[in-house]
Amino acid sequence: MYMRTLRVAGVLAALAGCAGQAENPIDYLTYRDEPLVQKVALDMHKQHVLEIAGPPSSEEPRTINPGTCNNYILHKEGQQQAYYVSFNSADRVDGRGFMSCQQMEKNQRARARAPVFDRGGGY
């Protein structure tokens, strides 16, 4: 029982680091063993990602930051889940997550438009 509690606490702590992203933590738990999720890391070269994950479902130019974004579809037990890997202009991974490239860019645009509050309590 003690080990199970520690595992759950560890998973929750790991997921807390993802709190700034609009993603479902269950997706990570479901697909965490997929090579694309497990092995692709920030600053990895695009060619290395393609060796791990294979060709993407689609590749798109990014509109907010220079670079490209690859859409993948993960499959498990009859379920499908979108997963993106974005690359900067040097073809290095600068983002990844459980959503499509379109949703990632939509979220970035929304964050850019969100009001910024200063520490003094003003706008």
Image (cartoon, grey):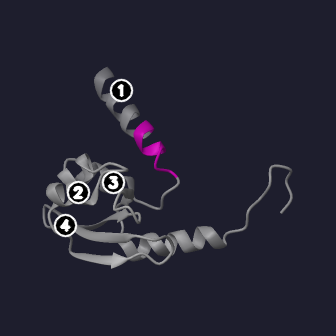
Instruction: Compare marks 4 and 1 and give the one earlier in the sequence.
Output: 1
Query: Which dot marks residue 49?
Result: 2
Q: Give the camera-side residue of 48 and 101.
A: 48
Determine contact: label 2, label 4, CB under 8 Å: no
Q: Secondary structure at mark 3?
A: helix
Kind of residue indicated by mark 2:
Val
Would you say 40 lies left or right of 105 here?
left
Q: Whole-percent x and y of residue 77?
A: 13, 61
- Say which quadrant the N terminus sits in: top left
Identify the residue under disc 3. Answer: 26
Instruction: Please tell me which residue lies in front, 28 or 111.
Output: 111
Question: In the shown orientation, is residue 40 left or right of residue 97?
Answer: left
Please tell me how crowded label 2 is: few (under 14), some (14-19), or many (20+) other residues with Cα within 10 Å.
many
- Residue 122 visible to an observer of this rendering: yes
Q: Start and end of the magenta stretch?
A: 13-19
**Amino acid carrying mark 3 in the image:** Ile
Earlier residue among tags 1 and 3: 1
Cα distance in 3D space between marks 1 and 2:
32 Å
Residue at 38% over, 33% down: 10
Query: Which circle, 1 or 2, is nearer the viewer?
Result: 2
At label 4, the amino acid type is Gln
Residue 79: which disc? 4
What's the distance in space between the residues labelled 3 and 2, CA to CA?
23 Å
Q: Which mark is residue 6?
A: 1
| 3D distance between C-alphas at marks 2 and 4 | 23 Å
